Amino acid sequence: MTVTDFKIALISDIHGNTWALEAVLEDLDSRGIQTVLNLGDSVYGPLDPAGTARLLMSRNFITVAGNQDRNIVECRGRNTDIPTMRYVLDELDDPALDWLESLPPTRVAEEDIFLCHGNPEQDDRYLIEQIGPGGVRLNNPVRLDAMLTSVNQNLIACGHSHVFRTVLTATGKLIINAGSVGLPAYQDEEPFVHTMENGSPHARYGIVTRTRGRIAIEQIILSYNWKRAADRAAENNRKDWQKWLLTGRT
């Protein structure tokens, strides 16, 4: 069987951060990368959901829905008492909401890469990481294979944790988490209280290259005007997001 060479970009968890996305798109264009796989959670947040949606729709990237993309669609046309969700719904027009609604939860890219946001069965649960009362740790290689029984591909790309990682399963499947373009840290309460931190406010994405069967993986870390993003979060009464965006820490 012929193995096709490729160079692709993996982006994920933009969370409405247009300023970070613009920096990533400029970098992608400078590298001449044509194939971009977007792993979801594209627009939710107290930043610029409409601007982010417009940019992504104009690029027509291969995209899957994240859990918060799904939440937006589920709340469409309904009342919500969540201020940030209300802000997002007020900002997005019908074409943007229709686009979100059209996104599948998983898909296979042309390069035979399986794409999901969280794990293949649950968009709001991690694949690489396991969350317990003691915090965050990596799933062991055998457990990873058990979570991928429905996946035939040997290269899997995911997001959701906002932390760039590359791990190998017991049977040799390679999983890449693309990190986060637009939100370098956060705190979550499910399934247990935990934090994810990158330690700096930079935008992050990944590049995967296959040449003569050999895989190379790069993490790209970019500066951008994160103060502008943090100011927007503060304007929308999200001091927590303001801190996360300015520091990459919780």
Image (cartoon, helix red, strand yellow):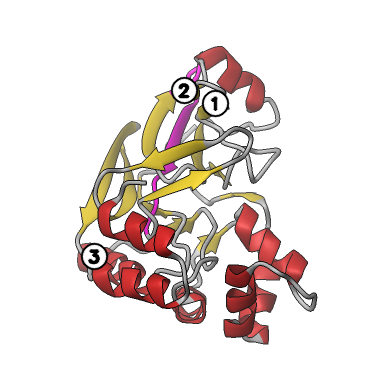
Q: Residue 48: image x %, image y %?
A: 45, 77
Eye-nearest disc, 3 or 1: 1
Q: Is residue 201 visible?
A: no
- The amino acid beneath tag 1 is Gln
The alpha-carbon separation of the residues under discs 1 and 2 comes to: 6 Å
Element at label 3: helix
Q: Is residue 165 above or below residue 149?
A: below
Write the start and end of the magenta stretch as one range: 168-181
Mark sitting earlier along the chain (3/1): 3
Q: In the rendered structure, does residue 42 fall within the stretch colored magenta? A: no
Measure how far apart labels 2 and 3 are at the Cα level.
30 Å
Q: Residue at x 66, y 67 (%)?
A: 82
- Which amino acid, by three-letter code, is at mark 3? Asp
Q: Are marks 2 and 3 in contact (CB under 8 Å)?
A: no
Q: Is residue 189 visible?
A: yes
Above or below, 65 against 177 in this view is below
- The residue labelled by disc 1 is 130
Of mark 1 and mark 2, the one earlier in the sequence is 1
Residue at 22% from the left image edge and 62% from the top image edge = 31
Res. 138 mark? 2
* Residue toward you, 41 or 206: 41
Precedes in sequence: disc 2 or disc 3 = 3
Do the numbered discs 1 and 2 sit on residues whose CB atoms are within 8 Å?
yes
Viewer-side residue, 57 vs 184 = 184
Q: Residues within 10 Å of mark 2 (few under 14, many from 20)?
A: some
Residue 168 placed where, x, y %? 44, 22
| Disc 3 target residue | 27
Question: Does the stretch in magenta take in 173?
Answer: yes
Rendered view: 189 above or below 231: above
What is the number of the mark on residue 50? Answer: none
Q: Is residue 170 left or right of residue 98?
A: left
Q: Disc 2 on helix, strand or loop?
A: strand
